[in-house]
Image: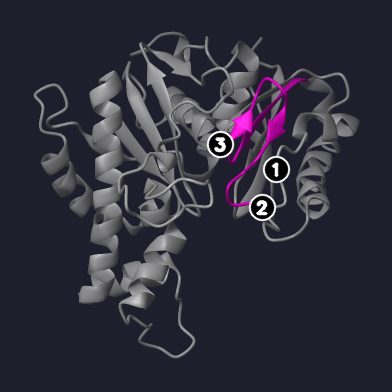
Amino acid sequence: MATDLAAALDIGGTKIAGALVDGDDALLTRVQRPTPAGEPAAAVLRAVTDVLTALAGHPAWPRVTAVGIGSAGPVDARTGTVSPVNIPGWRGFPLVEALRPVTGGLPVTLVGDAVAVAAGEHRRGAARGHANALCMVVSTGVGGGLVLDGRLRAGPTGNAGHIGHISVDYDGERCPCGGRGCVERLAAGPAIARHARAAGWRPAEPGGDTTAAGVARAAREGDPRALAAYDRAARALAAGIAATATLVELDVVVVGGGVARAGETLFAPLRRALRTYAALPFVRALPVLPARLGADAGLVGAAAACRSGPDTFLSGGAAGN
């Protein structure tokens, strides 16, 4: 019923967020901690457990009927394990079992974090009303999730739509995933900053922001090296989007995450590059929209997935509602 609550976790390479989410997708409470991504497995688990324990201390916790986890991937929903590319201490880590002291006997659903974002954006965000959507997160890494025929398609392991590890440069750099020339290696926030610095870009102010956000500010001011770094990222994203759209046919692409906050600094070259790569009639003019739910999309989606199952639930009851 609408008053039942789900506990939702969104585990990424930068932050770990948690919330209690009601049946109308409203967040009753929200908790967030930084991800100690470079530390050993136990330290990362402590941060996740701290978030979940804080939720369990909320007076509404007894109303929680299920737990949904969207984790940086790859994940394996069949075994409850995670191996996030950007959290090297977790490789085949038994996350669902490790959280059992807090979750107790509650059912737990595990999906990739971008799959959860796709669920959230389809229910309440920019993909609402579209039967076929690719929703992407461009941040510390690059991930994606697919909604096809109005249904979230997480796949057998919970990773379907993981666009960040499509290879778009077969002679490209080796990616931490083991592949070469992955979208993530070219378009994630650290990649944008790394490319700009390699080209000689530095913040105008000593000690200034050297992250992708700092590069975006410089790009808006017309710095050619910063603009080139975002153009390179946009072309990689466009190539991955075009490949995905050609395979499954899409109505819309939704892009969120920290890098997407650059706005038209990213979206203008992305749309321009997509016109080059997506040339067939059924992928031409594919709309690319900014995400609407911000940092809450993964939490809303993780809650929705655990209520109805990651490969069965419909957005708002039916596509277009």
Picture coordinates of residue 248 (x, y %)?
Answer: 30, 19
In terms of sequence position, does the residue under pointer 1 or pointer 3 come before the other? Answer: 1
Q: Residue at x 38, y 13 (%)?
A: 150
Q: Amino acid at mark 3?
A: Asp
**Disc 2 residue crowd, few under 14, some 14–19, many 20+, Cα 10 Å:** some
SS under mark 1 = loop
Q: Amino acid at mark 1?
A: Arg
Label 1 sits on residue: 91
Picture coordinates of residue 173 (x, y %)?
Answer: 40, 57
Q: Is residue 2 above or below residue 203?
A: above
* Residue toward you, 150 or 318: 150
**Disc 3 residue crowd, few under 14, some 14–19, many 20+, Cα 10 Å:** many
SS under mark 2 = loop
* Residue toward you, 36 or 186: 186
Between disc 1 and disc 3, the foreground one is 1
Quadrant where the C terminus sits is top left
Q: Residue furthest bottom?
A: 206
Q: Quadrant of residue 307?
A: top right
Q: Does residue 99 appear in the picture of this structure?
A: no
Q: Amino acid at mark 2?
A: Pro
Left or right? Give the position of 184 relative to 19: left
Label 3 sits on residue: 113
Q: Quadrant of residue 174?
A: bottom left
Residue range of the region highlighted in magenta in the rendering: 65-88
In reply to whether residue 73 is colored magenta, the answer given is: yes
Measured in 3D between alpha carbons, the distance from the residue under mark 2 to the one under mark 3, in whole angstroms, is: 16 Å
Measured in 3D between alpha carbons, the distance from the residue under mark 2 to the one under mark 1, in whole angstroms, is: 7 Å
Tally of marks: 3
**Disc 1 residue crowd, few under 14, some 14–19, many 20+, Cα 10 Å:** some
Label placed on residue 88: 2
Between disc 2 and disc 3, the foreground one is 2
Q: Residue at x 21, y 33 (%)?
A: 287
